[in-house]
Amino acid sequence: MPERKQHTSGSAAVVIRAADTAWTLHFGDLWHHRELLYFFVWRDLKVRYKQTVVGVAWAVIQPLAIALSLTLFLGRAVHGATGSLPYAVFAYSGMVLWQLFSQGLTEASNSVVNNERLISKVYFPRLFVPVGAVLSSLLDLLFGLVVLAAFLGIFHIVPTAAIVAAPLYIGLTLLASLGAGLWLSALNVKYRDVRYTLNFVVQFWFLASPIAYPISVVPERWRLIYMLNPMAGAIEGFRWSLRSDQPFPFLAVSLGTLTALLLFATGLYYFRRTEDTFADFI
């Protein structure tokens, strides 16, 4: 991390050295380079939809198409287990958070490798690369929430005061996405197998999350382990905030939050521990 030393001539020299420990973040240095984070987010947004015909409409088309497909093929089978939420709203509300998670995870996992030229030539806080990739997914979330609001209006669903808790579950989703993204982005630098296993990880995580079905259909003997998935707590909590006529999923949210915090803490530690070698392997 940079350490500034003042010379008698009045000019400042910047010495770049390794951090004392992997837990040392140097918030002053992060704040000094904060404009770079805005640049990474803006650049990722422009690259993502460059030369596309429908542009940001893909942020709505993809989750909406999947939600409608789930409604068509699974709506009758799961009907009754979704509480007072119509299955279309149930499925789409899960897809809104899932798209935020999966897109952030995918972009973050490839972010360091995709910025190899920049990382090998210029100093800046490497942490901004995966963080910017995850934050750029928030624009798609915004459009997804607009469509979700339209769904609520179509089905005459009026959210209660619990809707104010919705940002907490969005934050939990971002935390889980960033935590996993930090792990995979650092591993991807040294082990390029990560890019080939990423699709499998995302698909498996999708099936292991309560998007097409509620947690109540999971066998009780596996339910506690299932709730360790941070997306289980995030999605169930988000749905509860839309219409809080069901018991609050306290256990799922609590276990999911603990897992997300552990994933983020260990991912941050590993990323910080290995970032000094990124330029060597890239």
Image: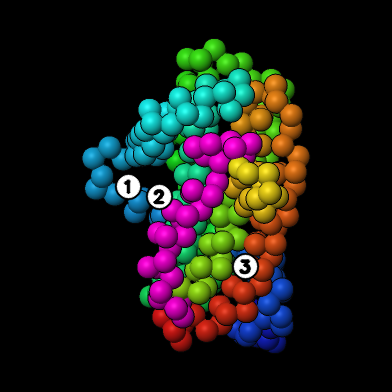
Cα distance between the residues tagged 2 and 3: 24 Å
User: Are the residues at dot 2 and dot 1 in contact (C-beta closer than 8 Å)?
Assistant: yes
Seen in the picture, residue 185 relative to 278 is either above or below; the reply is above
In front of the other: label 2 or label 3? 3
In this picture, residue 139 sits left or right of residue 174 = left
Seen in the picture, residue 133 relative to 96 is either above or below; the reply is below
Which label sits on residue 131?
A: none
Cα distance between the residues tagged 2 and 1: 7 Å
Numbered disc 2: secondary structure: helix
Q: Which residue position is annotated with label 2?
A: 45
Q: Which residues are magenta?
A: 189-217
Q: Which residue position is annotated with label 1?
A: 49
In this picture, residue 59 sits left or right of residue 212 = left
Main SS of residues in magenta: helix
- Amino acid bearing label 2: Leu
In front of the other: label 3 or label 1? 3
Q: Is residue 150 magenta?
A: no
